[in-house]
Image: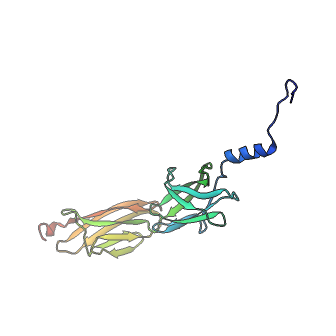
Amino acid sequence: MMLAAGVILAPPASALAARSAQTTAPLQPVISFPGGSSVPEGGRIAIRFDADGDTTVTRFRYGVNSTHLASEVPVGPDGTASVLVDVSRPGEHSVHAIAVDGDNRLSGLSAARFMVTVVWDLRGWVLDSTTFLPVSGAIIRLEPSGGEVVTGADGYFQFDVEPGVHTLSGLHAGPPSLSGSQQLLLDGQGVTFDLYLFPDSGSRGVG
């Protein structure tokens, strides 16, 4: 068949569609948090990935606080997948994910953020300044809030108070008799502080 000069013979529409299907990447996944985007420290957050109607997607790859997507979850019959992630460090965290189809084509990267809230304002351990060991049975007070706790065998204490300047003090009746105090600025974001107790002058060397 003769073609006139300058005429371009276009491939059939079916061939264009087939080529498009071979080169089209999956849609980016939609990331959401079914239980809310805020979770207390030490809890678990539910993360949902949605193929956004793209039926070619077979799985999602994702990472928390990293674009290195080391985790993978298969797509369910409804085009979504959900995971539960343990959380610990307070503050803002990120989730990144891509969709993968049956031919291992990858979508663009999606991102979403969630918040881990503190369930305490001040926590720490009471330590003997001479042995650096936990002090059990120490009375720990936080002023001016008036909070008071007694440490267990691990010397741990925890307070939930309003932000502001507070004085943390500890007293161990002994023997040996130990005491110590420290002024702290609490900002509502959670502070970890180890309180060292020192021997009273009359109990040095007693143990």
Q: How is the image coloured?
A: rainbow
Q: Report how many numbered discs are placed on residues in the image.
A: 0
| Residue furthest front as drawn | 1
State the residue in front, 175 or 145: 175
Image location of residue 80, percent across then percent down? 63, 64
Give the residue at x 65% y 67%: 77
Q: Which residue is located at x 62 percent, y 48 percent?
A: 108
Horizontal side of residue 74 vs 5, given as left or right: left
User: Looking at the rendering, which quadrant does residue 150 occupy?
Assistant: bottom left
* Image point (32%, 71%), residue name: 140
The correct choice, above or below, for 105 with respect to 173 in the image is above
Front position in the image: 84 or 23: 23
Taking depth in this image into account, of 125 and 139 the one nearest to the observer is: 125
Kindly identify the residue that appears in the image at 69 percent across and 57 percent down: 54
Residue 94 can be seen in this image:
no
Residue 100: percent from the left, percent from the top?
60, 53
Which residue appears farthest toward the top when viewing the image? 5
The percent position of residue 88, horizontal first and vertical second, equals: 44, 63
